[in-house]
Image: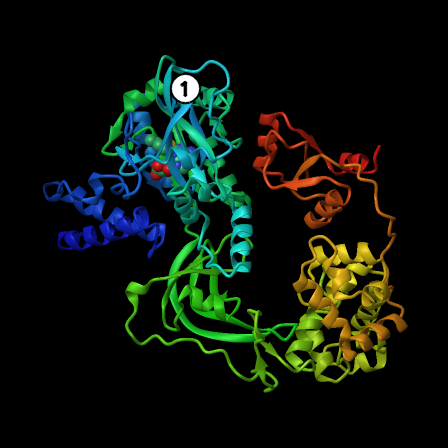
């Protein structure tokens, strides 16, 4: 332990705290910040005489930003002590048990939402003021902005204490965040790094009309202060809050032992990334409020609660290089080569960089230290650059002017974010397209791994995807590692793929901007490949949700002689180029109904069922509200199920949905 580090540590922490809380910016990850705080606490613990009133351990956050009135909180908004492994959690439980002089006590297990803490004040049942946490004692008055959040009741339901103050966490739903960024990208605006900072920025917009454009939401988790009513336990408080009309998370659980609390943590560790909101751990709270009072606080942290954090999903590492590969449409895709780091249990060596503009908008230079995030199945992303660590030796990325595989020129047309290799026969392009063509969402040809594809191209057996349908066993057997059995399997797989519906063929062809959703739409609208090929840009753009970009891309695809030849040869080989059963314009049996879909359904993909709902006149929402008519729930449905139950929204399965959709 080195007390000489104290000033340096405090300076670093203060700086990062200011960046984070006042400027909504972040240069180090939460985990690294926690680590600095731990080190500081440890040193101060050993040298209590060196604790100064201005040490970051002596306060919670930062001063309110200019522009908003100050609000004094009725009771301070505290922070939480952290645990990072089971032992630390058990040590907390032990301390509490000792202080309460009892081995067993109930706990409420909640998720720790990663957003922004707020306090909502109600007088005579009416929402009168909302404030950010600020420094814990004084926050910013963001009442008008909070009023734009639909799940905050402006007047509570039923009987309420005369004056009370509710605490909760405001967040930006992850799905909405993706859409929000896509929209911004489409408008040529800068995209945001993560939902948390965006929520913070949104709540602190000086014009509430801006906030209203952003679909913020809230989970409330406690009553901070109340006049006139008291509940006995945290569990009762949560139930009372839900009863008053507040949005309480449906995953809360009452644990009767430390083992049950640990079970809750480990269950959520497995699945928290599937939630539609940021979550960075669980919070375990002693249930009895009498016990809570007895336990009291230490410094700015209550003894009666602990945040057991999930392992970091953001880590800082170095960007060693930016390289490119060639995509199936010939796009030149830049990617980051990173100094390998372990994030949430997996080693990350690369991150996607999308295109030149993305690299520029992040201000990335080769050699930079960067914050990398890995969430769920999502490909690792670079969140931001740690500009403070630049040495001056960093250098900008330059898009190559020739294809790194075939050497032909690379072009970037105006209005396009991507650069393309101009050679349709570029071996890299053909290999990528082949990989995509045979993949599961496309023609789903079993027995055709990436290596086989490359071998087929190298041996000259395949020059375009139609060649797959003209393969002969003898020539296949000449390939390395291709035995009689695997050759037969491959040919059988090819044969079976001939009956895939038109939408899958359209996906498989790899037409720019035509993913499964658009392919479904086109297949349903035109019914046959011929009809689609005959369509003009005008015909296409007239279809709702098909924009001019998609229309132009489809027409350009079919205008190409080479592509038309591929289609002809697919047809000649017996590939069915028509939709299964195209019904005439369907009756709008779902008109006026609002659906939300959650979990895995037995036979529909998400986009399929959403397409079906819209086709039949219904609408699809991303979160359950009182206006939702039905929640269609499949396997592993998450918090939406609880939301629906709480709001009394009818929950149906796929079978019941199909009944509804058939007009029965
Ligand atoms: S209770 C005195 N419950 O975590 C305890 N906080 O590090 C007050 N948070 O400022 C907090 N989810 O912003 C509580 N289920 C939850 C929470 C939660 C997220 C945040 C909150 C608080 C911070 C403390």
- Residue 531 at what x, y percent from top left? 85, 63
Identify the residue at image location x=47%, y=22%.
155
- Residue 319 at what x, y percent from top left? 40, 69
Asked whether 415 or 162 is in front, the reply is 415
The number of discs equals 1
| Farthest-out residue, bottom | 407
Asked whether 610 or 603 is in front, the reply is 610
Q: Quadrant of ligand 1?
A: top left
Q: Is residue 96 above or below residue 5?
A: above
- Residue 285 at what x, y percent from top left? 39, 29
Task: Kindly state the secondary structure of the residue where label 1 is placed.
Answer: loop
Left or right: residue 296 compared with residue 448: left
- Residue 241 at what x, y percent from top left? 46, 23
Q: Is residue 341 above or below residue 156?
A: below
Identify the residue at image location x=36%, y=69%.
368
Asked whether 232 or 224 is in front, the reply is 224
Q: Is residue 488 above or below residue 480?
A: above
Q: Is residue 523 above or below residue 40?
A: below
Asked whether 101 or 607 is in front, the reply is 607
Left or right: residue 526 compared with residue 208: right
Quarter of the view holding residue 390? bottom left
User: According to the image, label 1 marks what residue?
Assistant: 233
- The reply to whether the residue tagged 1 has its Cβ within 8 angstroms of ligand 1 is no
Quarter the C terminus occupies = top right
């Amino acid at each position: 332990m080195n007390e000489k580090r104290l000033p340096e540590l405090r300076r670093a922490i203060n700086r990062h705290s200011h960046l984070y809380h006042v400027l909504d910016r972040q240069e180090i990850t939460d985990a690294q910040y926690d680590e600095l705080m731990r080190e500081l606490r440890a040193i101060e613990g050993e040298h209590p005489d060196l604790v100064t009133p201005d040490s970051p351990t002596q306060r919670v956050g930062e001063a309110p930003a200019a522009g908003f009135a100050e609000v004094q909180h009725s009771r301070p908004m505290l922070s939480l002590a952290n645990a990072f492994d089971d032992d630390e959690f058990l040590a907390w439980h032990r301390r509490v048990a000792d202080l309460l002089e009892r081995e067993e006590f109930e706990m409420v297990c909640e998720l720790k939402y990663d957003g922004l803490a707020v306090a909502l004040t109600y007088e005579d049942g009416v929402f009168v003021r909302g404030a950010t946490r600020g420094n814990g004692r004084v926050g910013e008055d963001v009442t008008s902005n909070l009023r734009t959040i639909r799940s905050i009741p402006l007047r509570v339901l039923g009987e309420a204490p005369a004056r009370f103050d509710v605490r909760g966490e405001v967040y930006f739903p992850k799905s909405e965040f993706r859409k929000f960024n896509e929209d911004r990208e489409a408008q040529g605006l800068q995209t945001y790094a993560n939902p948390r900072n965006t929520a913070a920025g949104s709540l602190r917009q000086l014009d509430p009309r801006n906030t209203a454009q952003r679909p913020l939401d809230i989970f409330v988790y406690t009553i901070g202060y109340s006049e006139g009513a008291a509940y006995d336990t945290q569990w009762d408080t949560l139930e009372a809050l839900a009863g008053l009309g507040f949005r309480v998370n449906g995953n809360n659980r009452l644990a009767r032992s430390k083992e049950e609390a640990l079970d809750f943590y480990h269950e959520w560790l497995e699945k928290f990334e599937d939630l539609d909101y940021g979550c960075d751990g669980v919070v375990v709270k002693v249930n009895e409020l009498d016990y809570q009072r007895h336990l009291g606080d230490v410094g700015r942290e209550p003894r009666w609660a602990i945040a057991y954090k999930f392992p970091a999903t953001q880590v800082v590492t170095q960007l060693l290089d930016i390289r490119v590969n060639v995509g199936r449409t010939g796009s030149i895709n830049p990617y980051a080569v990173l100094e390998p780091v372990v994030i949430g249990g997996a080693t990350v060596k690369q991150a996607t960089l999308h295109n030149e503009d993305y690299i520029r908008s992040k201000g990335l230079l080769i050699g930079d230290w960067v914050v990398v995030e890995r969430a769920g199945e999502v490909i690792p992303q670079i969140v931001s650059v740690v500009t403070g660590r630049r040495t001056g030796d960093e250098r900008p990325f330059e898009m190559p002017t020739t294809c790194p595989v075939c050497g032909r020129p690379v072009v970037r047309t105006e209005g396009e974010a991507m650069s393309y290799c101009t050679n349709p026969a570029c071996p890299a392009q053909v290999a990528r397209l082949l990989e995509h063509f045979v993949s599961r969402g496309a023609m789903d040809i079993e027995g055709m791994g990436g290596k086989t594809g490359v071998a087929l191209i190298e041996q000259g057996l395949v020059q375009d995807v139609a060649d797959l349908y003209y393969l002969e066993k003898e020539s296949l057997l000449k390939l390395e590692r291709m035995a009689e059995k695997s050759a037969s399997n491959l040919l059988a797989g090819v044969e079976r793929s001939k009956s895939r519906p038109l939408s899958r063929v359209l996906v498989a062809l790899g037409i720019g901007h035509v993913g499964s959703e658009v392919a479904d739409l086109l297949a349903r609208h035109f019914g046959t490949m011929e009809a689609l090929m005959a369509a003009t840009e005008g015909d296409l753009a007239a279809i709702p949700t098909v924009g001019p970009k998609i229309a132009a891309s489809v027409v350009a695809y079919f205008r190409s002689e080479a592509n038309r030849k591929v289609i002809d040869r697919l047809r000649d080989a017996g590939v069915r180029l028509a939709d299964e059963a195209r019904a005439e314009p369907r009756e709008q049996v779902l008109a006026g109904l609002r659906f939300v879909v959650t979990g895995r359904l037995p036979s529909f993909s998400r986009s399929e069922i959403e397409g079906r709902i819209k086709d039949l006149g219904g609408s699809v929402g991303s979160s359950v509200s009182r206006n939702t008519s039905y929640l269609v729930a499949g396997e592993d449905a998450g918090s939406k199920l609880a939301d629906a139950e709480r709001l009394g929204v009818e929950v149906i399965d796929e079978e019941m949905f199909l009944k509804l959709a058939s007009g029965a």
